[in-house]
Image (spheres, rainbow, N blue to C red):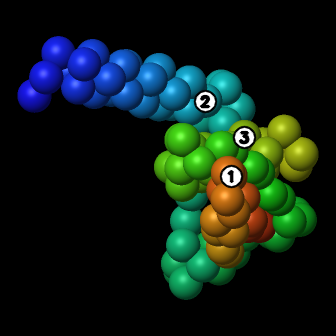
Amino acid sequence: MSMKTNITFASLVALMALSLQGCSTLSAGGQQVHVMPQNSNLIAGCTKLGRVSAEVTMLVASAAAENALREAAYEQYKADTVVPTNYDHGAVSVVAHGYAMRCD
């Protein structure tokens, strides 16, 4: 590798690390929201509160979209569970969709 390539690669790695650091933080409310698959028996007795969506940039991808969906479920409904239904991958962002639920 040339010196120029090493600097470019190091810059890319640093940029990715910074972007991932920003997406890993959940609020106290978001941390309380569990993510469950649609076919889970654990949501059978839950009350569906409403639909939620959350959008993040492509740099942070689907894991961040799931965390953003947890945040949205808590902020909009004070939900304790979110069930992702689909992820829309656009040119520069990912939008996660799902249902906010309460499973007291």
Disc 3 or 2, which lies upstream in sequence?
2
Q: Position of residue 93 (x, y in %)?
A: 68, 52
Q: Do the CB atoms of the residues marked 3 and 1 lie less than 8 Å apart?
A: no
List the residue tagged with mark 1: 93
Q: How far apart, in angstroms, are the residues tagged by discs 3 and 2? A: 7 Å
> Is residue 69 among the parts visible in the rendering?
no
27 and 32: which one is in front? 27
Q: At numbered mark 1, what does the secondary structure look like: helix, strand or loop? A: strand
Disc 3 or 1, which lies upstream in sequence?
3
Identified at 55% across, 65% down, the residue is: 36
Identified at 44% across, 23% down, the residue is: 15
Q: Name the image quarter holding the C terminus.
A: bottom right
Q: Please state which of the two labelled residues, at mark 3 or mark 1, is closer to the viewer.
A: 1
Q: Please state which of the two labelled residues, at mark 1 or mark 2, is closer to the viewer.
A: 1
Label 1 sits on what residue type? Ser
Label 3 sits on what residue type? Glu
Position of 104 with respect to 52 (left or right) is: left
Q: How far apart, in angstroms, are the residues tagged by discs 1 and 2? A: 19 Å
List the residue tagged with mark 2: 26
Q: Name the image quarter holding the N terminus.
A: top left
| Circle 1 residues within 10 Å: few <14, some 14–19, many ≥20 | some
Q: Do the CB atoms of the residues marked 3 and 2 lie less than 8 Å apart?
A: yes
Q: Position of residue 27 (x, y in %)?
A: 67, 26
Q: Position of residue 78 (x, y in %)?
A: 82, 43
Q: At numbered mark 3, what does the secondary structure look like: helix, strand or loop? A: helix
Q: At numbered mark 2, what does the secondary structure look like: helix, strand or loop? A: loop
List the residue tagged with mark 3: 71
